[in-house]
Amino acid sequence: MSDHERNKKEKTDRLARQETDSLDLSQEVQLKPSLGHLPQDTVIADRYKIIKEISTYGGEADVFRCLDLQTQEEVAIKIYRAHIKPKQELLELLLSLDHDHIVKLLEFDTWHGRFFEVMKYISGGTLADNMPFSEGSIRKIIVPQVLAAIRHLHEHNIIHKDLKPTNIFFCDHSCSQVLVGDYGISSIFRGDGSMHQSSSVKKTLEFAAPELFTGVFGFQVDYYALGITLLFLLTGRSPFEGMSEHQIMHTHYQYEENIFPPQSCSEQLKNLIRGLLHKNYKKRWGYEEVLKWLKGESVPIASYEKVQQQSTFNYRLSEDLVAHSFQELAEMMLENQELALKHIKRQHFFEAFHHYQDLAARLYDIRDKNHPSERSLLSGIIYTLAPDLPYKLMEGFEASTPGELARIIDLNRQTWEKGKEQLFNGSIPAWLRAIGYEEIANAWEEEAHKYKRN
């Protein structure tokens, strides 16, 4: 990976993963966005002496192996990028946890304006460092211990939300004890129901359960991520290899069984993975099902209901415009925007999607947000209905990715003015969010605000 690609990836990852409180930057020293390459023997917060860098290419922080000068024990220090700070309520809850299969958080504070966390040092590396794994290791070591960690987090109302091989560790080089860590985008579950609602959902795309795209989710997302994790561990590579971000998102979101275990693994393990990857969170395997599986009991895998098929969908925009699929409706709305604006102001429009619960949740979420203009609302709805539909800047100029759109906007004065207009009215950010580029939408909006101020 080139330096340019690495810098671009770090910026994207950092924007995608932030769930931040503001930091007091009055004491901040002039440092690079990444602290990286601090000299050995540097003492952090007058207590933690650096032994070695562990990672200085992470999306949100640098990690160092340090010696605690007070206890003489080795610890791992995670120093966040400037302006990034995890939610303190979550950290205080994590600080209280003490479990054999959860990385122990020891302390958190600030140093030179940077927020940092102190964790017990884990010497065995991540599961990603040791892939692929045998079925025996997965069945006897990894699944039962990760299951215990997930269960403990959920009992304390924490949804990990970022379970993956790089966030699961071996305690030491014996590879017999597994610990779950890295809670940078975790959420505290709120409410009395079975689902948690968030207006901004951070996620690692490859491991994201379908409901994470709706902003309404529960503990079940961690079991889906476990299923994807097992595919990585078995094969040593991503099940989405060669796919674009757009294609990965749609693979998750399509209501059908379309992510399959390797043919070479046993039927028993195939059943576990299939149960964990059920698209309907209500029918997805959770703690009880996985526990039964570990005991060798037979656990059924729920079938997929036909009610989710779009073939039954019909919506009439006008006497002559009747859509028979979400894609067709989106195309009609794009070509008849004034008519479409009248429809999305009516409750009847949203009630048409009640049989498609995940989509309905996303559409209501878009409707209830504060939009800079009606065009922003319309753009969000159109591209949520049909994320594969190219973004139409103007007649003859369409784009399917942010990069393509940026190049089109830069073509000439006319495209630049159109791009500026649609950035300011919110149409472009709404499209970006609908197709899964939340971090880029935020970045473009920030640039738009700077441009307006200047």
Image: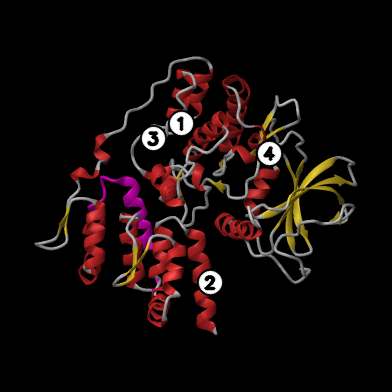
* Residue 345 seen in this snapshot: no
Tag 2 or tag 1, which sits nearer the N-term? 1
Front label number (3 vs 2) = 2
- Viewer-side label of 1, 3: 1
Looking at the image, which is closer to me, 230 or 345?
Answer: 230
**Callout 2: helix, strand or loop?**
helix
As measured in the structure, the alpha-carbon distance from the residue carrying label 3 to the one carrying label 2 is 38 Å
Query: x%, y% of residue 344?
Result: 26, 64
Does the magenta run of residues contain 342? no
- Which residue type does callout 3 highlight? Lys
Q: Can residue 227 be seen in the rendering of this structure?
A: yes
Q: Residue at x 90, y 46 (%)?
A: 70
The percent coordinates of residue 129 (x first, y second) are 67, 36
Magenta stretch: includes residue 356: yes
> What amino acid type should be assigned to the residue bearing mark 1?
Leu
- Asked whether disc 4 touches disc 3, contact meaning CB atoms under 8 Å apart, the reply is no
Mark 1 surroundings within 10 Å by alpha-carbon count, few (fewer than 14), some (14 through 19), many (20 or more)? many
